[in-house]
Image: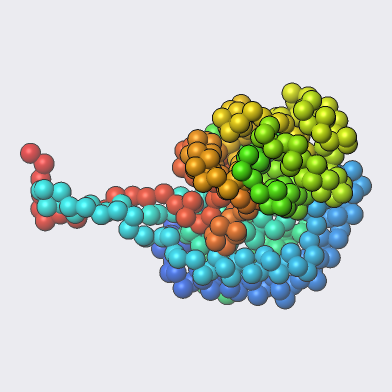
Amino acid sequence: MTDDALDIAAVMTSLGVAARTAAAELATSSTQQRDAALISAAAALRSNAEKILAANKTDMLAARGRDLSAAMLDRLMLDAERIEAMAAGLEAISELPDPVGKVIAEWDRPNGLNIQRVSVPLGVIGIIYESRPNVTADAAGLCLRSGNAVILRGGSESYRSSHEIYACMRDGLVAAGITVDSVQMVPTRDRDAVGFLLSSMARWVDVVIPRGGKNLIKRVQEEARIPVIGHLEGICHVYLHASADPEMARNVVLNAKMRRTGVCGAAETILVDRSVAQQLLPDVCRALTTAGCEIRGDEAVMEIVAEATQATVADWTTEYLDAIVSIRVVADIAAAINHIASYGSGHTESIIASDSDAAEQFLRDVDSAIVLQNASTQFADGAEFGMGAEIGIATGRIHARGPVGAEQLMSYKYVVRGTGQVRP
């Protein structure tokens, strides 16, 4: 039987039942056990690097034959450095404080009751992702750290790579004496498996987290009968305030746009204060075009930058994930904040400013998951936040927001201790 000739309902139900049982065991596992699993899995990644790279080579050849975009190919590609980063990420996760059983708050009532709010795992998490095989390790590692069982469903383009990484995660579980059903992977490329997970597994799966392109995330949000944590798009902005240092403005914009154009934290729109547009834009745009970036600007930008082409309204709402950027000249900080509110996706925004009052206004008034001052939007990353890794960036306002790390995969319960109290 091939991976694409399975009884989807039977296979997915089996995964769900096993995950629910494993979640109960994992929630009571010791910190030391879960640490050992993470460290052993990291070692397995390193010792199996050649197998992982061989699988990834096959995935890359097939992906090129499917004419995938440069951004998708970049996300799919693994090399020795990225495998080491996965292993180091698991070790970093193992060093994080254990969030399970943490007393978040505690108080006493006048009647003598002692009440604690205590963190507990969410339970079973379904993670649906595409392209990035490293998500297999990151997601499994964060779920282990937080005591959650996980069902992974990687993209068809990364099928071989993800399964080799998944095998390393299972090796870590075995070495630590934790049930291997704590981490499971959907054994088929069939898209119907995703549909079944979203529509028919609420009995076993507590939350779904999608990570990938707009079409995948939109499908998950529309079809899920289970709570979803995630974001639809990363339309990120860098605003160059009138007080911006010119060299900093150039360096931060270049990094925010061009470091990796295919990540959700890549800047897609640059806003420039009118009072400094003539001063800042030539140098900023020269750096961008030299790096191979196409510039689309409004009329004010086109008057300053000869290489710029006319931006349309659609450009302000486009997540390029490519070497393209839209640039707009705005009247002042209020106009910049209004533009972000009108066209942004609530992901990540940065202000370049030496004026501390302006910076604080921006940080306070911009309603996005991540706001930065004098730093690249590409810091929108769980590892850069000291979380070891992340499953994704959440832009919703319920439960998690921003990088989703181990602590964001927790819920809580109330523990109440009394001495025989009864309610009158």
- Image quadrant in which you'd find residue 342: top right
- Image quadrant in which you'd find residue 162: bottom right
Task: Look at 70% across and 43% down and name the residue there.
Answer: 267
- Image quadrant in which you'd find residue 345: top right
Q: Residue furthest top?
A: 313
Above or below, 176 relative to 395: below
Can residue 221 be seen here? The reply is no
Point out the image quarter for the C terminus.
top left
- For this rendering, which residue is in front, 69 or 302? 302
**Residue 120, position in %: x, y?**
40, 54
Can residue 160 be seen here? The reply is yes
- For this rendering, which residue is in front, 127 or 292? 292
Q: Residue furthest right?
A: 65
Task: Look at 61% across and 43% down and name the residue there.
Answer: 243
Above or below, 44 relative to 201: below
Task: Look at 68% across and 32% down and name the residue there.
Answer: 274
Above or below, 271 relative to 417: above
**Residue 106, position in %: x, y?**
25, 54
**Residue 191, position in %: x, y?**
72, 40
Task: Look at 60% across and 45% down and name the residue there.
Answer: 353
Q: Residue furthest left?
A: 424
